[in-house]
Image (cartoon, rainbow, N blue to C red):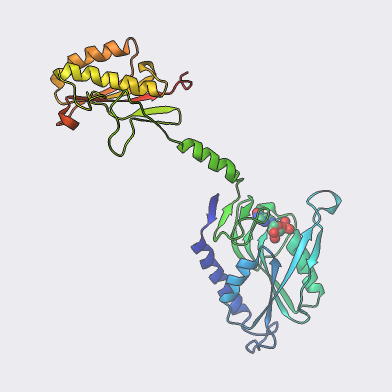
């Protein structure tokens, strides 16, 4: 989800709005001159459920006497004859007759909801009624609504978080984000499992992997072999006969490892060759060319200071698993 308003920004703005409200309601009555008595609290009315987080944070900053109440609305629909009709699902518990009322709403979208509530609160004989809305989706407005305290203007997208939901989800996000459909959790987990499913391959026809590694690993249709040196799998020792004998053994070991995963040299897409002495390169190239035939995988060749067991050459491959070649 794309974060639209981060949590610190939200809280900072809520504190600013609270300071404005506090200053405006410090004194009682319309043009009242005396500090608001506890017997004449500001009545903050939250619209369930979306405004709950906003209302709670806002009120924590207020120093004026304040009473809290809630109402809940339900809209009949967005089209046809019932378009814009809003009914009260849960009414106020408190009487607002002669009170200063602050309607606290999460978001003003078309404006139908707050328009209806503001009319109702006035009809109930409130002394004054003002609107405090955290978010103003101006571009979606269909009926005019005066917003006395506005948190943020937001783009015309469906937003969630900090009380706002999509199908009762995401209210608990501490920030406001643009809602995006989620991939079902089960599908996501399965995709992750198959992407990260790593299959190790082993053959007794190549030197055993002695240590925390595998002869080869298959993942996502690719086979990665460990580096092979000229060790005879039967004796576990480097073959005698110098560079050429070692190079032959390296290629034989790799052939067996590839075969254990159903691959051959034709599946190899990349080779890395490590040599202690690059002067041996022409001999290596001849043997390598013999093994590969017409196949020409990418290759890197580097000279290194030393190889395990005093070997003169080591090679590893990346191969495409059968069925994945196109
Ligand atoms: P209005 O009557 O179209 O202004 O809609 C107001 C109500 O619709 C708000 O109190 C929200 O409950 C809901 N609403 C409107 N837009 C959004 C949104 O983007 N995300 C979540 N709820 C929304």
x, y (%) of residue 81? 86, 51
Q: How many marks?
A: 0
Residue nearest the viewer, comparing 245 with 203: 203
Picture quarter with ligand 1: bottom right
Q: Is residue 222 left or right of residue 255?
A: right
Residue nearest the viewer, comparing 23 with 169: 169
Residue nearest the viewer, comparing 100 with 277: 277
Q: Residue furthest front?
A: 234
Q: Which residue lies at the image location 21% right of the left edge and 19% below the top edge?
A: 247
Q: Is residue 234 left or right of residue 57?
A: left
Q: Where 306 falls versus 60 (above or below)?
A: above
Q: Is residue 248 visible?
A: yes
Residue nearest the viewer, comparing 221 with 80: 221
Q: Residue furthest right?
A: 81
x, y (%) of residue 283? 18, 14
Quarter of image, res 212: top left
x, y (%) of residue 280? 15, 18
x, y (%) of residue 20? 58, 74
Quarter of image, res 121: bottom right
Q: Is residue 259 left or right of residue 182?
A: left
């Amino acid at each position: 989800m794309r974060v639209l308003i981060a949590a610190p920004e939200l809280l900072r703005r809520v504190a600013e709005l609270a300071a404005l409200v506090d200053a405006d309601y410090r004194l009682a009555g319309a043009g009242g001159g005396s500090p608001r008595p506890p017997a004449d609290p500001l009545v903050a009315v939250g619209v369930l459920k979306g405004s709950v987080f906003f209302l709670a944070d806002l009120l924590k900053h207020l120093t004026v006497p304040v009473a809290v109440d809630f109402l809940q609305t339900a809209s009949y629909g967005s089209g046809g004859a019932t378009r814009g009709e809003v009914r009260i699902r849960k009414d106020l518990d408190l009487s607002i007759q002669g009170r200063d009322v602050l309607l606290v709403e999460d978001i003003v979208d078309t404006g139908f909801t707050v328009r209806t509530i503001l009319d109702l609160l006035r009809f109930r004989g409130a002394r004054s009624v003002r609107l405090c809305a955290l978010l103003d989706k101006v571009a979606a407005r269909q009926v005019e609504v005066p917003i006395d305290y506005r948190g943020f203007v937001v783009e015309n997208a469906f937003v969630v978080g900090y009380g706002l939901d999509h199908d009762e989800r995401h209210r608990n996000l501490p920030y406001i984000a643009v809602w995006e459909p989620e991939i079902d959790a089960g599908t996501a987990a399965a995709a992750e499992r198959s992407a990260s499913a790593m299959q190790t391959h082993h053959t007794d026809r190549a030197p055993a992997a002695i240590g925390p590694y595998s002869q080869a690993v298959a993942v996502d249709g690719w086979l990665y072999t460990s580096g092979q040196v000229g060790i005879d799998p039967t004796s576990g020792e480097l073959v005698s006969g110098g560079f050429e004998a070692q190079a032959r053994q390296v290629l034989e070991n790799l052939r067996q490892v590839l075969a254990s995963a159903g691959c051959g040299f034709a599946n190899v897409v990349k080779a890395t060759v490590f040599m202690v002495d690059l002067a041996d390169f022409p001999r290596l190239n001849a043997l390598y060319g013999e093994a590969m035939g017409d196949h020409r995988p990418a290759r890197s060749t580097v000279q290194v200071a030393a190889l395990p067991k005093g070997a003169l050459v080591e090679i590893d491959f990346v191969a495409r698993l059968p069925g994945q070649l196109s």
